[in-house]
Image (cartoon, grey):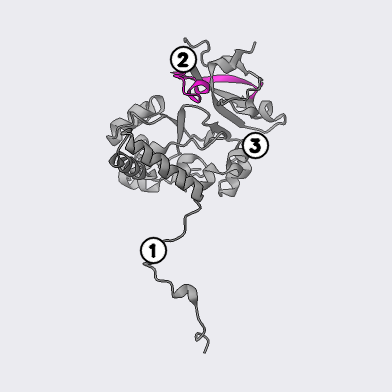
């Protein structure tokens, strides 16, 4: 699968609930961030966890989030980054 | 007269065998043993393979990361490579094979930006270069608090950063394992790489500490 986003793109993490294994932390669901790095594609961990081979491979991004966006209160000069797979991201225009 | 009573803890034989189970739950230990014996019996791997893997795991120490940091300080071209493609740069310099290891990313601390790494989901850690993570790194307290109140957590490690330095909390949520390239201390221009490496602490490569003399 080709990467849809490039560094600098504004993105939003899907807010969905899943009952099965996934590596998108709850505290970032629905939050807006900016793509910092594109790491290439990796097997989808949501399938690997259930003994599948993880296709299609998902592009992985390092995404930066402002503190206030994540926690709803200001905190100067504080940023959180997390690595999020493409199928958890949508464009945020 | 003052010392004629018994000090049982002083009477302990320092060479006595360890009889405690180090907090491993007996059922977990039993499960591990059963699984290991089954896998050996079914020729999935051998006892020697396990021994080899344990020795490999235990050979990974923060000293490896420290050598990489010192080399990056000494050689700007190497630093650029390390920041761009950490795994290849580390394999090349340390002459170790990281084929079976997770991906590695090195993030650089500067006078404007300080990185601290964590794994809020579990305990992802750059074991290839720092070895086994400290217990606190895996604790729910560190994992949850460092993303909520990073400056307070750093202060508890004795690390107080100027207010105008950006703190970037790096949550290792997926395939990448992060290591911090700390700021080089001042007045170290004449040091050899070995001397520089001796200054680099594990905690500075996690980002909960800064190196003495590096903040000015």
Q: Relative to B53, is B212 above or below?
A: below
Q: Chain of mark 3?
A: B
Q: Is residue B168 magenta?
A: no
Q: Relative to A57, is B208 above or below?
A: below
Horizontal and vertical percent position of residue A36: 52, 21
Cα distance between the residues tagged 3 and 1: 43 Å
Return the residue found at the far right: A73
User: Badge 1 is on which residue?
Assistant: B17
Q: Nearer the viewer, mark 2 or mark 3?
A: 2
User: Badge 2 is on which residue?
Assistant: A55
Marks 2, 3 in one chain:
no
Left or right: A43, with A25 as reference point = left
User: Badge 3 is on which residue?
Assistant: B148
Helix, strand or loop at label 1? It is loop
Helix, strand or loop at label 2? It is loop
Q: Which residue is drawn at the image coordinates 50% and 40% (left, top)? A: B207
Helix, strand or loop at label 3? It is helix
- Estimate how packed mark 3 is, as few (under 14), some (14 to 19) or many (20 or more) residues with alpha carbons within 10 Å: some
Q: What stretch of residues is rendered in magenta?
A: A29-57
Q: Chain of mark 2?
A: A
């Amino acid at each position: 699968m080709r990467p849809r986003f490039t560094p600098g793109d504004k993105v939003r993490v899907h807010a969905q609930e899943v009952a099965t294994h996934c590596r998108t932390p709850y505290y970032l669901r629905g939050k807006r961030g900016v793509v910092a790095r594109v790491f290439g594609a990796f097997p989808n961990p949501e399938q690997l966890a259930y003994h599948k081979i993880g296709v299609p491979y998902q592009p992985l991004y390092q995404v930066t989030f402002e503190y206030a966006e994540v926690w709803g209160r200001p905190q100067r000069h504080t940023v959180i980054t997390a690595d999020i797979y493409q199928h958890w991201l949508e464009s945020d225009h | 007269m003052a010392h004629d009573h018994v000090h049982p803890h002083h009477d302990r034989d320092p060479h006595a065998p360890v009889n405690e189970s180090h907090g491993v739950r007996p059922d977990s230990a039993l499960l591990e043993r059963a699984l290991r014996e089954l896998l050996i019996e079914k020729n999935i791997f051998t006892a020697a393979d396990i021994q080899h893997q344990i020795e490999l795991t235990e050979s990974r120490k923060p000293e490896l990361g420290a050598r990489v940091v010192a080399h990056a300080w000494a050689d700007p071209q190497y630093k650029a490579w390390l920041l761009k493609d950490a795994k290849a740069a580390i394999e090349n310099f340390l002459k170790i094979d990281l084929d079976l290891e997770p991906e590695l990313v090195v993030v650089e601390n500067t006078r404007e930006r300080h990185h601290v790494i964590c794994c809020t989901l579990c305990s992802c850690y750059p074991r290839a270069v720092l070895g086994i993570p400290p217990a606190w790194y895996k604790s729910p307290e560190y994992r949850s608090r460092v993303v909520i109140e990073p400056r307070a957590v750093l202060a508890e490690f004795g690390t107080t950063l100027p207010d105008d330095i950006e703190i970037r909390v790096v949550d290792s949520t997926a395939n990448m394992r992060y290591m911090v390239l700390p700021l080089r201390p001042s007045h170290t221009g004449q040091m050899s790489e070995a001397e520089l490496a001796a200054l680099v602490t594990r905690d500075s490569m996690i980002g909960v500490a800064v190196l003495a003399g590096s903040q000015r």
